[in-house]
Image: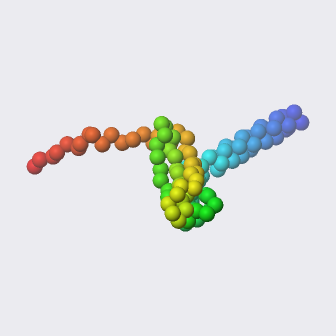
């Protein structure tokens, strides 16, 4: 085998290995993204309700809720003092959530099957 042929084989093998590695890294980087989003929403709710002082100084009660803003889903934490005064509002947004998760058409009823 000539040096040129050997060099081409080594370059081809290296290119293939780098390409496969890039695909594997890309897959690993993208795979947990959806799960991480869900986990963050759950952690946000839990910390809002159990530790409202993290969201506003003097807060003793945290109220978590979700709301729709066009195509975005917003996770909201309202922090209140012991007299019920709103001290602060923190919003975490999932951009384009309602594009990725369109609403289910509930107007359609299944057919009735008679025997």
Q: Residue furthest top?
A: 4
Residue 111 is drawn in which quadrant?
Answer: top left
Give x and y (percent) for residue 106.
30, 42
Q: How is the image coloured?
A: rainbow
Q: Is residue 33 above or below residue 53?
A: above
Residue placed most toward the observer, 38 or 23: 38
Q: Residue furthest left?
A: 115
Say whether residue 27 is left or right of residue 1. Answer: left
Q: Is residue 13 in view? A: no
Residue placed most toward the observer, 40 or 13: 40
Q: Is residue 27 above or below residue 70?
A: below
Residue placed most toward the observer, 55 or 85: 85
Q: Is residue 65 in view? A: yes
Say whether residue 77 is left or right of residue 20. Answer: left
Q: How many marks?
A: 0
Residue visible at 39% across and 41% down? 103
Residue placed most toward the observer, 3 or 36: 36
Q: Is residue 28 above or below residue 3?
A: below
Give x and y (percent) for residue 100.
48, 40
Residue visible at 47% across and 50% down? 66
Give x and y (percent) for residue 23.
67, 43
**The N terminus lies in quadrant:** top right
Give x and y (percent) for residue 52.
57, 62
Residue visible at 81% across and 38% down? 11
Residue visible at 55% across and 62% down? 81
């Amino acid at each position: 085998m000539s040096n040129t042929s050997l060099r081409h084989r080594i370059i081809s093998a290296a290119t293939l290995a780098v390409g496969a590695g890039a695909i594997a890294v890309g897959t690993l980087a993208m795979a947990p993204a959806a799960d991480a989003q869900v986990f963050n929403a759950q952690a946000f709710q839990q910390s809002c309700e159990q530790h409202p002082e993290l969201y506003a100084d003097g807060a003793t009660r945290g109220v978590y809720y979700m709301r729709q803003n066009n195509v975005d889903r917003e996770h909201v934490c309202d922090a209140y003092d012991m007299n019920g005064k709103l001290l602060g509002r923190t919003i975490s947004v999932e951009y384009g959530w309602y594009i990725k998760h369109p609403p289910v058409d509930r107007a359609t009823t299944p057919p009735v099957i008679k025997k």
